[in-house]
Image (cartoon, coloured by chain):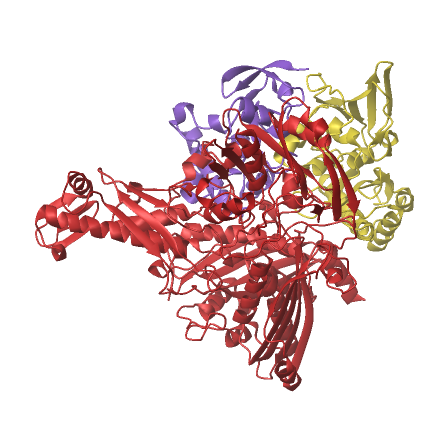
Chain colours: A purple, B yellow, C red
Amino acid sequence: MKLSVTLNVNGTNYFIVVEPHWTLAYVLREVLGLTGTKVACGTGDCGCCTVIADGKATLSCLTLAASAEGLKIETIEGASTQFKEKLHPIQTTFAEIGGAQCGFCIPGMVMNMKAFLEENPTCTEADLRRALGGNICRCTGYAKQVEALISARDLLFQERRLPH
Amino acid sequence: MCGGTDVLVEQNPTVRELVDLSRLPLSYIRRMGNGILIGATTRISQIERSSMLNRPPFDIIRDAVKDFGTIQIRNMATIGGNVCNGIPSADTPPPLIALDTVVKVEGVNGSRKLPLEQMYRHVRKLSLKRGEILTELRIPMSPSRTAAAYVRLSRSEVDIALASAAVRISLDRRDRVTANRIVLGAVAPIPLRARKSEDYLLGRVLDQQTLTECSHLASEESRPIDDVRATAQYRREMITVLVERAIRRAVSKLRRTTR
Amino acid sequence: MRTVTEEKRSIIGARLPRVDSIEKLSGSVQYAADLKFPDMLYAALLRSPHPHARIISINTRKAEEIPGVKAIISRDNAPRFLFNSSCPLLDVEGDQVIFDDWVRYVGEPVAGVAAVDIDTARVALASIEVRYETLPFVLHSESAIGLASPCVREKGSNIAFEIGTNQESIDFDKAIEKSDYVFRGKYSTASVQQCAMEPHVCVSKYDDSGRLTVWSSTQIPFRLRSTLSKALGLSVGKVRIIRPPLGGGFGAKEQMIVEPYSALLAMKTRKPVKLEYTREEEFTVGSRRHACNVELETGVSKDGTFTARGADVILQVGAYLSHAPGVMSKAFAHFLMLYKAATSRFDGKCVYTNTSLSGACRGYGAPQIVFAIERQVDEICRELELDQLEFRIRNSYTMGDVDPVTNFKIETGANEASIRAAAEKAGWNNRFSPKAFGELRRGMGIARYMYSTSAKPWWPEASEALAIINEDGSVNVVTCAVDLGTGITTGLAQIAAHELQVDASMINISKESDTETYPLDTGAYASRTTYVAGGAVKLAAADARQKLLSAASRILGVDLDELDAKDGKVYSKLHHEKSVSYGEVVKKCRTALEGSSTILGRGFFEPKGNGPTFGAQIAEVEVDVKTGQTKVLRIVAALDVGKAINPANIEGQVHGSIQMGVGYALSECLKWNEAGEIINPSFLDYKLIAALDMPKIDVIILESPDPSGPYGAKGVGEQPVVPTAAAVLNAVNDAIGVSIRDLPATSEKIYRAINAQNN
């Protein structure tokens, strides 16, 4: 029996009808066409499907779409500011240093670390590596990603300190 | 279900309906006298950050959730889910049992309380009746000069536990053990109180000989199996190491806080 | 021969940020997994539960009646053309068909369904009734090789392929007898998986004119096209493979796996059909590295040289040949190449087993054989108290020697330099004193490699590219080279920018491949892309530059010798004011300038050699002697790349390889039960190492140019995974005096070894 739900994704409300067992990942990709979020395991082990829900990094493959109603969901498509005028520091540092190789794990990693840096602006390298435990990457060995994240952390810290 | 991090992975084909508990007002960490109350739908990440769990021996719970899954899993998983899933490698039951946690269970026929230890019958089999849910965990206060520690062994930095030990130790002014709990994880179908080792430790001073004997007793009490992650033999032998390390860690916490 | 430092360089050697990063970082890049077409159907495959059985009957009637099911395929309606799923370049007798009358491994596809959504397709699978007659099976190569073993493929030998030196080993046995010391040992490696994050996936479309288009996450578009046409009985010209950006490959996608089923269903439904493997399917049937047993018999003289080197190698193939002959041939070659000896002997057997296919996996046979050899060298040096560095250097092939495999003269090679550079950086000569910190022990180990670039001498190597100058001076470089995340797209853009002397931002290079519209490049494998496709792009850009100069000479009325091209302009070296922009040249050419109508450079490149590369890695480990848990603290990786086109890309390959290599050494392993089922088909139980497990990595890039490669460049994608496991286990040996000869060296294995030693 289908359910009517309203999903708030990247600031837009979507009124859709879902099967109870549909995951948020499935709905984002197949119904809303937001294919930036990837599914690489479907069992919550790899982090490729990570989105931000009410400020918390969340696995969309283990979230039922119906349960996601009422949450403020942010996907990789919304990670840059509106109209992609300004990329998030994680995106710019990754691009500069080479944190993305094949790129398949990247949307989930950007979202996980975006939420993490927001809550942990003074984290250490060890904290970053621990947080990266939530994203499997097979290409990079995490080395340039950690380097980029340290840079992004510092940029974000500066941004916060500067008067607006 | 609440977090979904076990239920949605397991995909049990006999499940016909799912009830999502996440909107119930059961997400809290509160003081009750000198003890702590934790609501069942409290997320692991909230527990990780809670300053109410700073002080020994409650900090054993923070030990336990520090290596729990990944950041996303900690954001989604709930302590109630981890307690009620009933799988041997779960990280929160041994520490909670080491703290003598009592659970509140509510259902259509009213509510009841029971020690968490008594909830577990076998793998994925709990003393929950149809229509009942776990709603609250009640961690009582501990005597002074008590500390607790949780130590686990896994294959890599992001992994479930192969074997674990949760230890709570209370010492008198002459450093003799006045009370203790030794609870083993992932080495039996349920979280296992190593009662022989607990009895052995009472009244003793914790020197190397005592630690060695105690941890060997605990290892003998364990009932691990072979599985894809490790052999029973290895797990049994590792309990010796883990119990000793957990006791040492608890004692060093005690020394730090009672100067 | 120079070491790369951070001094200012030209675009060749620049750390240019990747040209395809932004779309990946913003989530807008479309992988094959993201493709969706109107009316698209979703496919799912029904798989055998038995490791070996004859299919008695298949009844699809109930499944056909399910609403939303559009087509079902099985042996009853599929073509029966033989193929080899490794899509070989040369003609090889096939040993597989799409659906056979037997199943020979758990998970072998038996039927396929296309339906309006994936849930319906899966429900339909459950309604297909298959009756099997189970047959005897064998799962392990040691058993399968015996004469009394069940036949994996119903009849015939279980030895699928054999290769080696002359079987008359009298000379070898004599040499062993006369050696001062003889070392014998058995070394084994487990089956591990490539684990690309994007699974195998494709979408097929078949139109009424009989043309098939397949969008596939493939490393080998042209090779796939040949084999797919063969398997389906279609004319090659009617098959088009389009390759979107890949979400990783590591060799897993150098194989035809999902395409035949998707294509067949598309042919039957005349609708687009998508087939995407789940992660469980990836682990169980998605290609993996061959498990390998190596027995070494080695003679060493008192002065520390090899007098005789012998190897007996067994590769566990699975039920179908696929890449096995290639992997074994490469193991053979790299056995010979790794060290010199007066006499060498090699016997390699590829053995069928009733397990799923093994295929290409980064290093392709070299990691297995180098593990064995470098572990034994470590044991030899310890036993005979010989210096680990000097022994290796003394016995290696180096520049000036004749390559024992190709018989070419080795014209490149920083073998000794890489060993010494790694040793210096790692502090090899002052290592760990004391070694013990409480319950922890530290150790350091070294391993080296010599590894060829491209698939020569087994296969021909060639690539073609185009460089088109546009009317505004921008450039389109067209190449079918496949970037599976290696960054080759950026490297090739740098080559084109250098040849044309324009800013890299003016180069627009192919980010996809299309067999119908692009010139030939055989794909990403054997670390060939910089070497071969780079050579083609270099020639194409140089050709375009030459055509610009020619046309400009006529436009400016100046002699060709007087002209140069730089920064988007062609100008006279004598009179600088006489100049014309690239764009203007193109515009003038288009308006009927006699002799040319467009500026299009073509480059066709066939390398003359196979770019031997050299390198060494030193690992530092820390072992907890109470639990056997081992942490790799640091790896120093020195590698000779000939010429570093983009050092950041090279570092990226080293970092990723080390994650794979450490996993290979310590934790990764596919496991089967006695019913032939894989019991750890998920990331939960197939342990990859995480960011916190990773060692600190120092990369030392050395450049010993190879005259056969563009700017002297050689391959780099696979090399860094070749020595890692040996280096780590050599370090463990150094730390605790225990020599572990089989992978993975899990905590439990190390713990047992420590205890055995203590008793």
**Residue C229 picture location, percent across and down:** 51, 45
**Residue C242 picture location, percent across and down:** 45, 39
**Residue C351 picture location, percent across and down:** 68, 60
Give the quadrant of residue C535: bottom left
The answer to whether C324 is drawn above or below residue A47 in the figure is below
Q: Nearer the viewer, residue C717 or C586?
A: C586
The answer to whether C611 is drawn above or below residue C696 in the figure is below
- Outermost residue to the bottom: C178
Left or right? Give the position of C53 relative to C229.
right
Left or right? Give the position of C543 relative to C119.
left
The answer to whether C559 is drawn above or below residue C20 in the figure is below
**Residue C286 picture location, percent across and down:** 62, 45
Residue A35 appears in the rendering: yes
Which quarter of the figure is the N terminus of chain C placed in? bottom left
Left or right? Give the position of C27 relative to A25.
left
The answer to whether C382 is drawn above or below residue C596 in the figure is below
Q: Nearer the viewer, residue C354 or C132?
A: C132
Q: Nearer the viewer, residue B151 or C701?
A: C701
* Residue for point 61% across, 80% down: C300
* Residue for point 63% across, 39% down: C279
Residue C50 appears in the rendering: no
Query: How many labels sit on residues?
Result: 0
Which quarter of the figure is the C terminus of chain C placed in? bottom right
Q: Nearer the viewer, residue A13 or B62?
A: A13
